[in-house]
Image (tube, rainbow, N blue to C red):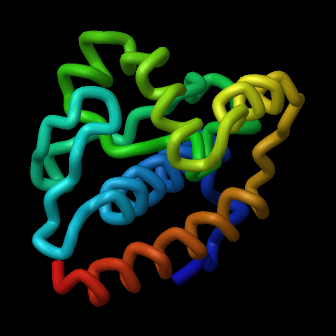
């Protein structure tokens, strides 16, 4: 469901909502049918609810903040205490999406992007639907 009173929600509040649902999507996407994910950096396995959605390029860069190629399941240790293991994360991105994918993400992260309320509301709805589909598909 979209937000019927969207004009009363602040951009900050919408970003927070999209962050939550996008994180849930990433962790479910990377989970197997029993709900377990492998950390993209160290390979540690954990239940999807106990993992982080780790960004290769920092969340501060709006143009890549919600790019699914930039974000993967990561254990809390790698994401929070080892600065996301950026070098390893980048190598794994190249393995997943092809050589140069990590460099491409770094390049586009420099683009100026404005997250408008309409854009945020649309993507909140989009990722809520994707989360619902993944939970159903994986019986979680």
State the residue in front, 57 or 1: 57
Q: Quadrant of residue 119?
A: bottom right
Task: Judge left or right: residue 49 versus residue 89.
Answer: left
Residue lying at 57% horizontally and 23% vertically, measured from the top left:
58
In the rendered image, the residue lying farthest to the top is 82
Q: Is residue 44 left or right of residue 100?
A: left
Q: Nearer the viewer, residue 131 or 104?
A: 104
Residue 44 falls left or right of residue 83: left
Q: Is residue 64 above or below residue 58?
A: below
Across and down, in percent, residue 47 comes to 11, 54
Across and down, in percent, residue 2 comes to: 58, 78
**Quadrant of the snapshot with the C terminus:** bottom left
In this picture, residue 82 sits left or right of residue 60? left
Quarter of image, res 26: bottom left
Kindly identify the residue that appears in the image at 49 percent across and 81 percent down: 129
Vertical order, 104 against 32 (above or below): above
In the rendered image, the vertical position of residue 82 relative to residue 3, given as above or below:
above
Q: How many marks?
A: 0
Q: Residue at x 83, y 39 (%)?
A: 114
Q: Name the residue at 63% across, 72% down.
A: 5
């Amino acid at each position: 469901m979209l937000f019927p009173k969207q004009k009363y929600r602040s951009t900050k509040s919408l970003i927070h909502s999209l962050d939550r649902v996008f994180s849930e999507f990433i962790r479910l996407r990377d989970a197997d049918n029993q709900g377990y994910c492998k950390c993209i950096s160290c390979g540690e396995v954990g239940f999807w609810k106990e993992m982080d959605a780790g960004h290769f390029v920092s969340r501060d860069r709006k143009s890549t903040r919600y790019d699914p190629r930039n974000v993967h399941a990561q254990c809390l240790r790698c994401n929070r205490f080892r600065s996301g293991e950026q070098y390893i994360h980048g190598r794994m991105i190249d393995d997943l999406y092809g050589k140069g994918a990590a460099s491409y993400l770094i390049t586009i992260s420099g683009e100026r992007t404005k997250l408008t309320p309409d854009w945020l509301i649309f993507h909140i709805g989009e990722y809520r639907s994707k989360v619902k589909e993944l939970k159903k598909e994986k019986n979680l």
